[in-house]
Image (cartoon, rainbow, N blue to C red):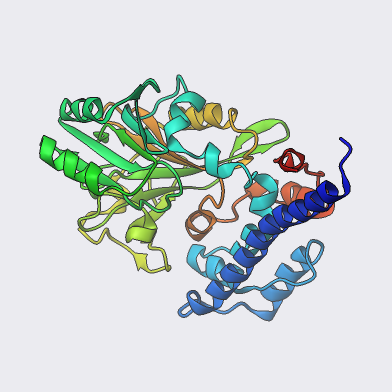
């Protein structure tokens, strides 16, 4: 398309601002995580030896001219394993996540209201009602009025409502039980969020409920698209709520422990800042829990990940219902919980580490812009 002079000027200006936005997000994220490693972590962790520092730097210097070792120190201390392949959070936020995942389209794709389309035929909680851009829609995406929406909710004994966009760590989640019309109307009147999803309250399995039945406790498992295949990354975490919380997120005080390949749990857990727990704070031993449907979980997330090739690295939150059927609760399409995995398991990418880092830092694939800016000039 041939542009007039003023159009070409505008095109170049918009293009630069668009590209700079995502570069800035990546760089500022890297800087923030780098500061976190010094201000939040490592107050009680073992220092690295000179030999360990040298080994880590020798591995990473082929990719970067400088690396801060604070995250290596933290993860090595927490796991009790020395490994040069741990991915520092600042490197992940600044380079790896933006390369593997299309951050430019993530805000729309991650709207939970559309998961019933993306993951049709896969196990998920039942959706009763949607609010999209302030409009009410039923479970089949038919626009309905407020009166009909209230009637749908009144017909349910219980339901859970949560923001469908721009939410992190269980923010804004609320459960309603045997709710009156007045309570629903009051909630809708006071609500300022334009995008919500109203779903069934999952009755979880006896095993996932064992340590903390008040929250829906989930499995965080990671998939990676590499070599034209969806791979399950080596470590997974079992996330557990504490106290009165109805969510299991570490950012809301929850804890997490390693889920072993035989379905058992590690005998300890950590919270968001690395405090170690040998027992659940409410009582209960981690070793009493056993997840018996790992094969079904692997199959579920592999099938789901194949539908999301714009996002090569996805962190899945999987619940198990009362019939021991795994359900997709969340697909974390960017910034997918590296810290949770590496604190309890080991290097995020495991055997794929060298191949992924070589691709990102040595032989990167050229990427086209997600938006056609010329339509605006």
Q: Residue at x 26, y 54 (%)?
A: 285
Q: Which residue is drawn at 32% across and 63% down?
A: 278
Can I make out residue 267 in this image?
no
Q: Position of residue 310 (x, y in %)?
A: 65, 37
Q: In which quarter of the image is residue 318?
A: top left
Task: Answer with left or right where residue 358 lies relative to residue 34.
Answer: right
Q: In which quarter of the image is residue 181?
A: top left
Can I make out residue 202 in this image?
yes
Q: Position of residue 98 (x, y in %)?
A: 66, 51
Please tell me which residue lies in front, 209 or 84: 209
User: Which quadrant, please, contains the C terminus?
Assistant: top right
Q: Quadrant of residue 87?
A: bottom right
Q: Position of residue 275 (x, y in %)?
A: 38, 69
Give above or below for 354 relative to 86.
Answer: above
Give above or below for 289 relative to 81.
Answer: above
Q: Residue at x 36, y 51 (%)?
A: 170
Task: Answer with left or right where residue 201 lies relative to residue 31.
Answer: left
Q: Residue at x 72, y 48 (%)?
A: 356
Q: Position of residue 200 (x, y in %)?
A: 27, 31
């Amino acid at each position: 398309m041939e542009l007039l002079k003023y159009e070409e000027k505008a095109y170049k200006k918009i293009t630069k601002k668009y590209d700079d936005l995502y570069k800035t997000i990546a760089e500022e994220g890297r800087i923030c995580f780098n500061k976190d490693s010094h201000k939040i972590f490592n107050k009680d962790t073992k220092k690295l030896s000179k030999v360990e520092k040298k080994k880590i730097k020798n591995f990473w210097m082929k990719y970067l001219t400088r690396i801060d070792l604070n995250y290596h120190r933290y993860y090595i201390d927490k796991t009790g394993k020395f490994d040069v392949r741990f991915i520092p959070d600042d490197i992940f936020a600044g380079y790896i996540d933006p390369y593997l995942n299309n951050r430019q389209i993530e805000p729309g794709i991650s709207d939970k209201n559309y998961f019933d389309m993306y993951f049709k035929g896969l196990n998920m909680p039942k959706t009763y009602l949607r609010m999209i851009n302030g409009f009410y829609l039923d479970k089949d995406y038919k626009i309905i009025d407020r009166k009909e929406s209230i009637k749908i909710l009144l017909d349910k004994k219980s339901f859970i409502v949560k923001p469908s966009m721009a939410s992190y760590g269980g923010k804004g989640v609320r459960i309603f039980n045997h709710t009156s019309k007045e309570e629903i109307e009051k909630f809708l009147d006071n609500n300022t969020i334009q995008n919500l999803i109203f779903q069934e309250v999952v009755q979880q399995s006896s095993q996932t409920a064992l340590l903390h039945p008040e929250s829906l406790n989930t499995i965080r498992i990671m998939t990676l698209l590499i070599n034209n295949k969806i791979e399950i990354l080596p470590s997974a975490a079992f996330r557990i709520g504490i106290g009165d919380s109805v969510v299991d997120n570490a950012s809301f005080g929850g804890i997490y422990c390693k889920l072993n390949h035989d379905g058992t749990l590690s005998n300890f857990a950590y919270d968001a800042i690395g405090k170690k727990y040998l027992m659940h704070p409410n009582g209960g031993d981690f070793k009493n829990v056993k997840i018996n449907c790992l094969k079904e979980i692997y199959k579920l997330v592999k099938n789901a990940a194949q539908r999301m090739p714009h996002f090569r690295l996805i962190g899945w939150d999987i619940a198990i219902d009362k019939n021991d059927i795994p359900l997709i609760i969340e697909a974390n399409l960017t910034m997918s919980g590296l810290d949770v995995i590496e604190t309890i398991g080991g290097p995020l990418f495991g055997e794929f580490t060298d191949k992924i880092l070589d691709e990102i830092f040595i032989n990167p694939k050229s990427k086209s812009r997600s938006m056609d800016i010329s339509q605006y000039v």
